Amino acid sequence: MQYEFAQNQGWEVLAYDLAGHGKSSCYSRYSIGRHCRDLGRLLHKFGIISPVLFCHSYGVPIGLEFAQHHQVSAMIAIAGGTHDLAPWWEIPLMKLMAWGGRYLYHLPRVQVFNNFLSTSYRHSVMERFFAENPIPTDFDAYKALEIFWDYNFFVRHPLPQNLHIPTLVITAGKDPMFTQQMGDDLASHFVNSTHLHFAQAGHLVMAECAELVNQAIANWLNQQVYF
């Protein structure tokens, strides 16, 4: 959704799946530092300097960490923040999936049922999103999440750098994982920040309200980066 929108705007765009997710290869050991290293290498390979980072959920810590050590023009943080990233129910659920629950998702009807529970939106963009992002059935996709459960940006960086970076925070009213208050807290740490809240959307707000999110991003970038 955002990838194609960026292309249509004539922006140079690079999509990065964390190791162990999507079609990316797996690691024997996972760390946030390795993810940042991979991202840095990809950007270098394609000659992209000072990118605008677009991060969703557990991708937000990667963006925060990357911005501590690399030149970044701006950051868009959706449904993720600096700490307390996993609600109380997520860790046991993900462990259950890793131990064997993931095998259920080889069954198409289970995927469909999970998709139905994940959002109240039933439009074609969501159908495409779920088709392109099925629930993973391999072990590493769940093992890779563990590095984020105890993540705390301010423990790692008592004196954080580059908080002047223009930052757009997007939250959704029906997101049980990252609340509006958490978005306010994240935005407050940046000198130049904007917080947009979509009251009727959920954790997948960037797909549920794709046109609204895309236009909001374009307007913000034109004001903050491309003016």
Image (cartoon, helix red, strand yellow):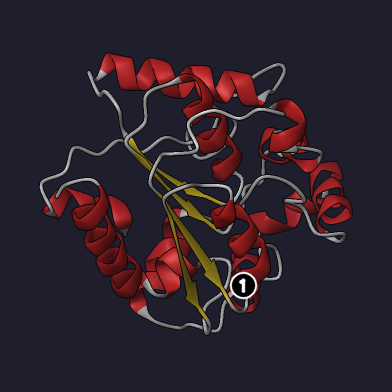
Residue depicted at x 61% and y 30%: 160
Q: Position of residue 193 (x, y in %)?
A: 44, 54
Residue depicted at x 23% and y 45%: 225
In front: 142, or 2? 2
Q: Quadrant of residue 70?
A: top left
Quick one: quadrant of the N terminus? Answer: bottom left
Residue depicted at x 69% and y 23%: 30
Give the amino acid at mark 1: Ser
Q: Is residue 49 left or right of residue 102?
A: left
Q: How many marks?
A: 1
Residue depicted at x 52% and y 25%: 68
Q: Position of residue 61 (x, y in %)?
A: 60, 39
Q: Is residue 149 above or below residue 71?
A: below
Mark 1 secondary-structure assignment: helix
| Residue 118 can be seen in this image | yes
Q: Position of residue 191 (x, y in %)?
A: 47, 47
In front: 226, or 146? 226
In front: 178, or 128? 178
Which residue does the numbered mark 1 point to in the structure image? 118
Q: Is residue 9 left or right of residue 6?
A: left
